[in-house]
Amino acid sequence: MGATDAAAAREIAVDLAAIRAAHARIRPHIHRTPVLTSRSLDAAAEATLFFKCENLQKVGAFKARGACNAVFSLDDAESRRGVVTHSSGNHGAAVAWAAARRGIPAWVVMPENSAAVKKAAVRGLGATVRFCAPTLEARDTTCVAVQAETGALLVHPYDDWRVIAGQGTAALELLEQISDLDAIITPVGGGGLLSGTAIAARGVSPSIRVYGAEPAGADDAWRSLQRGQLVPQTDPRTIADGLRSSLGVKTFAVLSTLVDAIGTTSEDAIVQAMRLTWDKLKLIIEPSSAVPLAALLERKLPVAGLRVGIVISGGNVDLDRLPWQP
Amino acid sequence: MGATDAAAAREIAVDLAAIRAAHARIRPHIHRTPVLTSRSLDAAAEATLFFKCENLQKVGAFKARGACNAVFSLDDAESRRGVVTHSSGNHGAAVAWAAARRGIPAWVVMPENSAAVKKAAVRGLGATVRFCAPTLEARDTTCVAVQAETGALLVHPYDDWRVIAGQGTAALELLEQISDLDAIITPVGGGGLLSGTAIAARGVSPSIRVYGAEPAGADDAWRSLQRGQLVPQTDPRTIADGLRSSLGVKTFAVLSTLVDAIGTTSEDAIVQAMRLTWDKLKLIIEPSSAVPLAALLERKLPVAGLRVGIVISGGNVDLDRLPWQP
């Protein structure tokens, strides 16, 4: 570990004990998702794969874990203020769901051009939707405005230690369910899932290898780790809509310290891996969830012959239009 | 139980002990599939539902259980003769898979107009495909011809006690996984799954209600039970391609004795239930597997407020063309 890594490590405020505490906190609310295997996918990847099915989680994504941990970590006085977040995707639904479980108000800031079905889903879970222009700046300023107006507390989609600890509980369960894993891979967008996974996995099994996988068209994590400094994602181009965000300060610190490598994948491989998973595992997964398998199909990560855990991140897709259809 | 039922009961050659023995025999080869739940599906059905996910089974269907039990029940001399069956669907793949596991030859008789992907799947599992004209008669005569020519032993898709015992192991697991079920529902085509399920469920829990669900456009089981005699299916009209067969003599005997009712469903409800399952459970299921939920959406079975197990039978669908797409 170099001087920079050591500095980064000092900033990491979550450890295995915190992830175990998060698990105890959220366990009554979440599904303990199953782990599935497939010999044909093993053959395609030349490794033995164990898929942790967070597409079968509440709200159809691992995001339920982090949001639930953040919301149930609030003390009573804080909780009465309610929570706010910005997300056009799974994190918005997860915060709405977790707030409803606790019986507190939630506001979700979404770009005005979000899909109608996503707006309806968040409203159906009882949250108030606030629209903003489809830019990063508008998202942040609208979120700050909602906080100022309502007193609600921010639950950031990934750069929040409570959220990171919650996301780490998926790997904690996977390591309980499957013994002797040599490596674990998750998709990386903002880095919350990969950060929690790395802390949990290295805590339980110090020699395990931890990898991220991201689209070549949104490879800010790969570039950030290469350069040793946070490189924001501009102009992401990928079908994997959950992976278009930039790393945050906290997730960059964790990834710099605990992640062995990031594999980047082509769009063709993502669609191929998505379809292969639908076909062989009989699971609905969203494009972002196919990225780790895509990295293995393209031999971008050194796991030949190993026992590899993969976190399938979510299953929320438009069933009217599939990426392999004309 | 009337005189006819008593006569039927005497013909039933499988009991709970036989299903337990089948389970011990096939357990090293099959997946113990998970059981999933969904609050939104519970709300839609007005019952508490537990889905036993046989779409996640080997070859993507419960058929792996029955075929495996039949193939591994053969003694060594028998097994050297190999096995033959007729099926354009999941049973053909299941027999091919089970024979390959045991290292014995398999022949699968398929209509010459079967989908190319199904022919390829059976061949990919190592079986020899024999084509026949797309009629019931041609299927049977071709199967007899293959037996005569090769000496292979028939593994009928459903009217075979070893197959029925194997299919019953899914319910046996479900009853171990979930306690206090009030009722259990499976789709009914030839009746092998429903027969095995009824014997297992009534054996474990005599007061449990056992229901079948079938398309109104292929309702021979409903008509047979109404009339008290086997009414063959002619001209089936349903998207649920796994449920177009007629009951057999053995499965009719079991259903007459042990099944409480059959619910019949519209084609619209089948497609709606299939899409709802994809959307909420994030599972790829084939149309036949959606029929029990369709029967509940149409309130065709009296399970309001009950704890209900549903066996999801399979997940083999054409991903290029979905029934809700134009």
Image: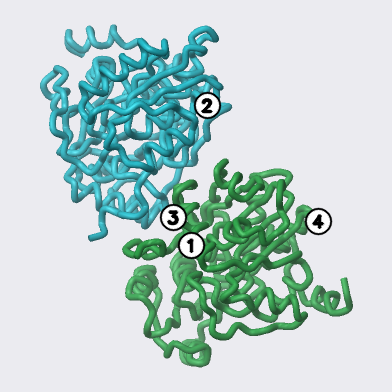
Chain colours: A green, B cyan
Residue labelled with disc 2: B100
Say whether disc 3 or disc 4 marks the residue closer to the N-terminus: 4
Query: Label 4 marks which chain's residue?
Result: A
Residue type at mark 1 is: Val
- Residue at mark 4: A206
Disc 1 target residue = A271
* Residue count near mark 4 (Cα–Cα under 10 Å), binned few <14, some 14–19, many ≥20: few
Question: For residue B231, which quarter of the picture?
Answer: top left
Q: What crowding class fits label 1: few (fewer than 14 Cα within 10 Å), some (14-19), or many (20 or more)?
A: many
Q: CA distance from mark 2 to mark 3?
A: 29 Å
Q: Secondary structure at mark 1?
A: helix
Q: Are marks 3 and 4 on the same chain?
A: yes
Q: Amino acid at mark 2?
A: Ala
Q: Vertical placement of B316 versus B139: above or below?
A: below
Of A151 and B275, the residue lying toward us: B275
Please, is residue B301 above or below residue B160 in the view?
below
**Distance CA(mark 1)–CA(mark 4):** 33 Å
Q: Position of residue B177 (x, y in %)?
A: 49, 35
Task: Give how far across and how far down residue B290 sits, in percent.
Answer: 30, 44
| Secondary-structure class at tag 2 | helix
> In front: mark 2 or mark 3?
2
Left or right: where does residue B194 sit relative to residue A260?
Answer: left
